[in-house]
Image: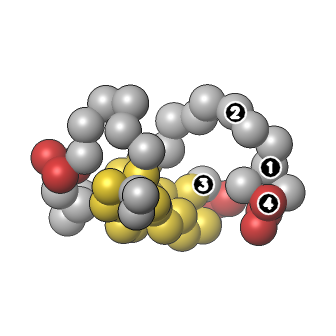
Amino acid sequence: MPAISWPAMTMDFQVAPNLDLSKVQLGQPVDFRLEKGNGGNYTVTRISPAAK
């Protein structure tokens, strides 16, 4: 993630409680938004299948 100077990696994130993950499948490329919360933790606040 160049915007926050992170190299390529696998990482787990919290997911916002109102987010519907049924629209994406395991292994599918996605577009998503992270928001940094208190304590420096990141939460996924939007996710959708990536544009082709």
Q: Position of residue 27 (x, y in %)?
A: 38, 30
**Residue 43's spot in the image, x, y percent?**
47, 58
Q: Please provide percent x and percent y for residue 38.
A: 60, 66
* Residue under pointer 2: 9
Residue at horizontal 65 percent and vertical 59 percent from the top? 39
Image coordinates for residue 22, horizontal then vertical, percent:
14, 46
Disc 3 residue type (three-letter): Asn
Per the image, the residue denoted by label 4 is: 2
Q: CA distance from mark 2 to mark 1?
A: 8 Å
Task: Give me the residue at 59% from left, 34% from top.
Answer: 11
**Looking at this view, is 37 or 8 the one in front?**
8
Q: Nearer the viewer, residue 19 or 37?
A: 19
Q: Which residue is mark 1?
A: 6
As helix, strand or loop, the secondary structure at mark 4 comes to helix
Mark 2 neighbour class, 10 Å CA radius: few under 14, some 14 to 19, many 20 or more: few
Which is closer to the viewer, label 3 or label 2?
A: 2
Task: Return the mark for residue 48.
Answer: none
How far apart marks 1 and 3 lie (CA) works out to 14 Å
Residue at the front extreme of this rendering: 52
